[in-house]
Amino acid sequence: MMVDQFVKVGMADLKVANYKDAILKTTGLGSCVGLALFDPYTGIAGMAHVMLPHSEIAREGKLNVAKYADTAVPELVKQMTALGAGQRRLIAKMAGGAQMFAFSGSDTMRIGPRNVEMVKKLLNQLNIPLLGEDTGANFGRTIEFYNSTGKLLIRSVLQGVKEL
Amino acid sequence: MDPLKRIADFQIDVLKEVGNIGAGHAATALSKMLDKPVDMKVPLVNILHFEQIAESLGGDEEVVIAIFLRVVGEAPGNMFFILSHQSAKKLLSQMAGIESVDNTLFSDMEMSALQEIGNILVGSYLSSLADFTHLNFSPTVPAMAIDMAGAVLSYGLIQFGQMGDHALLIDTKFLEGEHEVEGHFFFIPDPESFEKIFVSLGVPLE
């Protein structure tokens, strides 16, 4: 079967992939957080591009669970275990949560750090170890997760490429 | 209920006019600064999925210069003025007379000139909107970022994120001379602001 190597994860979206050559990718993370979960034993990986920390504030008719950290993390775990991943084997890597513009005050503008905090809280609750992160600061990131190696590649405009 | 679903075609036309007037004033301000004629395109008013917004600038990863400010007051929203890297360099050399030494990076001098140009443009855009709608729009201090389009724009979509996956965008492009400098204004009113904007323009939502 021919499958696309790259699996594109949009904004407020999540995807899982269970084949060895898959590369999960999400672009242009600013204050959003890109989270990759991986089961090294089965090679099943998942990625979410979350935009907001908490679904409590949602006022949309049909909730997009991928958009909020508190709903996206459990959903990602659910979809991965449905494919055969073991929850206790999962590891996590993440990037994003930047503060793109330098403002003082307003809580909305601190959305990046709040997204990061929320994802960490959820990972902690689910006992998923966070093996690497490149979060905060004031620059955008594009990330790629390689199922074959379990590496997370992070690209940015001025900071170059980083591997976790 | 999602106010975007209640917007009719003629109301979109009204928003185009809003974009026209705002950008028209900004273009006049720019034209005075440059001492050159500045043209403007008919604005695009669209209800776009989050993914499509960055696409209108060349994709999520396209590096752009963005001036962002939060509009507070009676009809709050987010405002961006966005230039491509190339356009920013041209604007600087033509306007501020700053010939750049490095074509890939911006010096402190160039950064502060861009910030100032951006401030003047968004300021004139907003003050004409306020005159036109009789609503009070107060800009917060603008901030600038040079980064991936997806990363900067997503910042302006947080208020919409709570409502759905679409945002209403009033996008006006302007061009200086032989299509050399291209800038975009994005005005993204908060979901709650539509009602007020439409009421003040005499076309309330059904």
Image (spheres, rainbow, N blue to C red):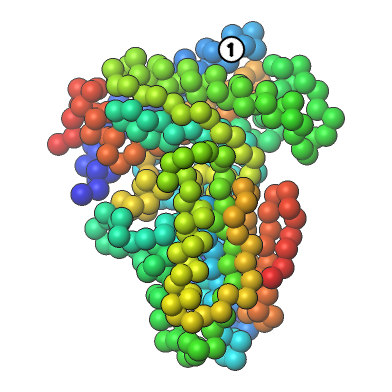
Assign the N terminus of chain A to one quadrant of the image.
bottom right
Is A45 on the left or on the right of A108, as rendered?
A: right
From the viewer's perspective, tell me whether residue B19 is left or right of residue B11: right
Q: Can residue B53 be seen in the rendering of this structure?
A: no
Subunit that carries the residue with mark 1: B
Displayed quadrant of residue B4 = top left
- The residue at 77%/37% (across/down) is B105
How many C-alpha atoms fall within 10 Å of the one at disc 1: few (<14), some, or many (≥20)? Answer: some
- Looking at the rendered image, the quarter that the C terminus of chain A falls into is bottom right
Above or below for B157 versus B187: below
Residue B109 image point, x, y percent: 74, 25
- Dot 1 falls on a residue whose secondary structure is helix
Looking at the image, can residue A141 be seen? yes
Looking at the rendered structure, the kind of residue marked 1 is: Ser
* Relative to A99, residue B25 above or below: above
Vertical position of residue B9 compared to residue B2: above or below: above
Q: Residue furthest front?
A: A105
Which sits in the foreground, B102 or B174? B102
- Mark 1 = which residue? B31
* Placement of A38 over or under B104, stated as above or below: below
Residue A105 falls left or right of residue B99: left
Across and down, in percent, residue A55 comes to 33, 61
Give percent across and percent down for residue A40.
Answer: 61, 87
